Amino acid sequence: MAVKALPRIYDTPTIPDGQIQVQISLTMRADVDSDGKTYLDVTDALQKVTHRWQKSYANYAEDFAISDEF
């Protein structure tokens, strides 16, 4: 799996809310996962976590919080 975060994007220079586009790339070997079950399990888990982050900033902030740092 490769994850790439692009630079922040702002709608206007005066609004502090920005967007960070993220690209996720996943490669799996077909000879190890012949029925595709592992692929579906992994992509389902990725979809659930990214959807959770997209739904709420609080969810994202909680998952990425570093205690005593930010």
Image (cartoon, rainbow, N blue to C red):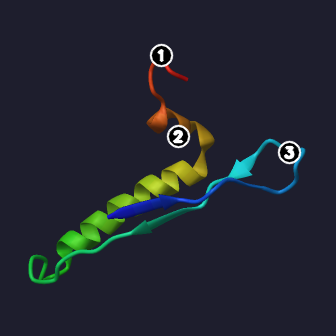
Residue type, mark 2 in image? Asn
Mark 1, secondary structure of its residue: loop
Please name the residue that numbered disc 3 is placed on. Answer: 15
Please name the residue that numbered disc 2 is placed on. Answer: 59
Numbered circle sitting on residue 23: none
Position of 47 relative to 30 (above/below): above
Position of 28 relative to 54 (above/below): below
Foreground tag (3 vs 2): 3
Left or right: residue 6 compared with residue 36: right
User: x%, y% of residue 36?
Assistant: 20, 79
Residue at coordinates 24% horizontally, 73% vertically from top-left?
39
Cα separation, mark 2 vs mark 1, equals 18 Å
Residue at coordinates 59% horizontally, 51% vertically from top-left?
55
**Of 4 and 47, which appears nearest the observer?**
4
Mark 2, secondary structure of its residue: helix
Residue type, mark 1 in image? Asp
Mark 3, secondary structure of its residue: loop
**Quarter of the image with the N terminus in it:** bottom left
User: x%, y% of residue 20?
Assistant: 63, 55
Q: Residues within 10 Å of mark 1 (few under 14, many from 20)?
A: few
Q: Are marks 3 and 2 in contact (CB under 8 Å)?
A: no
Residue at coordinates 34% horizontally, 59% vertically from top-left?
45
Position of 30 relative to 40 (above/below): below
Please name the residue that numbered disc 1 is placed on. Answer: 68
Mark toward the start of the polypeptide (2 vs 1): 2
User: x%, y% of residue 68?
Assistant: 47, 16
**Of 17 and 43, which appears nearest the observer?**
17
**Of 56 and 21, which appears nearest the observer?**
21
Cα separation, mark 1 vs mark 3, equals 28 Å
